[in-house]
Amino acid sequence: MMSASTMTLDRLRELLDAYGASPERWPPAERSAAAALLSESNAARGLRDEAARLDALLDLVPARQPSHQLIERALAGAPNDPRQARWRRVAIVAVPLAAAAAAVVVWLMPQRQPANTPETPQYAIEDLGVYTTPTDVLLDLPGFDLSASAPVVGCVDNGLGCPLTDTGEDRQSRLPDADRRDA
Amino acid sequence: MHDTDSDETLMLRVAQGDHAACRELVERHLGRILAFASRTIGDRAEAEDIAQEVFTRLWIHAKGWRPGPGRVTTWLHRIALNLCLDYRARMRQERLDAVPEPIDPRKDAVTLMQERDVQAHVAAALQALPDSQQAAVVLCHYQGFRNAEAAEVLGVSVEAVESLLARARRALRDRLRSVAPELLEGK
């Protein structure tokens, strides 16, 4: 450890020129000797005061605190929480397995379909029974007897709605006069 | 107790993917790194980008980090210093390429003082220093580094740091004396 006698004014000037007036910035090994010289010498204190004025000017340059946004930006590329990393490892295994299972199901679906083909779904049959086209509506007018409008000429099949003509006389009676003569 | 973990312990936790340790390191060092970059390059927005980049590199290299004689804060400042020096070199090149503004001969020192505050003059004087001198001042005066720590960041001897500091402070005093003599003379 240095004493005041080992610290010269020149060396103190060098310290002040380099590190400024604050003793905590001086090399620890020379602090006590410099402090001793300062306590004894007016010239030393003059040098220190001059250095302190430059320190005060330098301290005017501000240092703002980082914003919350900057903190989050700095953390953006940081490693994730280990719990999240574990879930990620699980996902790395589970997702391909799930995809493979889905692919197998899709692959099996067309092979099972022919077995179902002969069986017409019940709902489809029910739909056919109630289906009505626009022309059906026209033919089914209220008070209109479809069988009464069946053609007379050449209509011999009662099953088709022809009038019942059990006797040939009745059938001929409906023929035009010329046709009736030919008959 | 995580709150009192050393930087070195936090780095080991970061290497294991501990997000809480990452946040602790950011909260502990981001302010200092931002202040260092801001004073070194004199541009707040660019300083924020540099501070972010320092931590991006920390996350990348965390797995390969091993405890050693060097402190984490020294390592972070060295990364920040390199990024700042790159930026200053780019700015010097851009200034060389740009056409300089003509100096208004009617403006004397008093007028300049009226137009700008002392703080701006000091920041400008700091920016005008050569790279190594400026880095030495920012590390030792603002960041509170001891000369041996600054020497480690700068990659020079302790004696060289002292020489850089002395030349830097002399240059600052000469420059500021022309615009703020009353502040330096103590009158």
Image (cartoon, coloured by chain):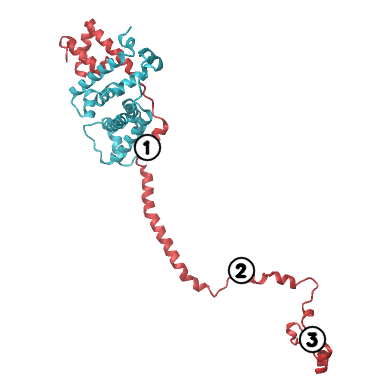
Q: Earlier in the sequence, mark 1 or mark 3?
A: 1
Say if A77 sits above or below A53 in the image. Answer: below
Q: Earlier in the sequence, mark 3 or mark 2?
A: 2
The hue in which chain B appears in the rendered picture of the protein: cyan
Provide the residue designation for mark 3.
Answer: A164
x then y, percent, for residue B54: 31, 34
Q: Are marks 1 and 2 on the same chain?
A: yes
Inspect the image, locate mark 3, and give the three-letter code of the amino acid beneath it: Leu
**Residue at position x 24%, y 29% from top?**
B153
Residue A75 numbered tag: 1
x then y, percent, for residue B52: 35, 34
Look at the image and tell me whether residue A86 can be seen.
yes
Q: Chain of mark 3?
A: A
Q: Look at discs 1 and 2 and give the one toward the viewer.
A: 1
**Residue at position x 74%, y 71% from top?**
A138
**Residue at position x 44%, y 64% from top?**
A105
The quadrant in which residue A135 appears is bottom right
Inspect the image, locate mark 1, and give the three-letter code of the amino acid beneath it: Leu
Provide the residue designation for mark 2.
Answer: A123
Secondary structure state at the residue bearing disc 3? loop
Say if B181 sits above or below B6 in the image. Answer: above
Of B128 and A136, nearer the camera is B128
Say if B177 sits above or below B127 in the image. Answer: above
Q: Chain of mark 2?
A: A
Q: Measure how far apart labels 1 and 2 are at the Cα level.
A: 60 Å
x then y, percent, for residue A108: 44, 67
Inspect the image, locate mark 2, and give the three-letter code of the amino acid beneath it: Tyr
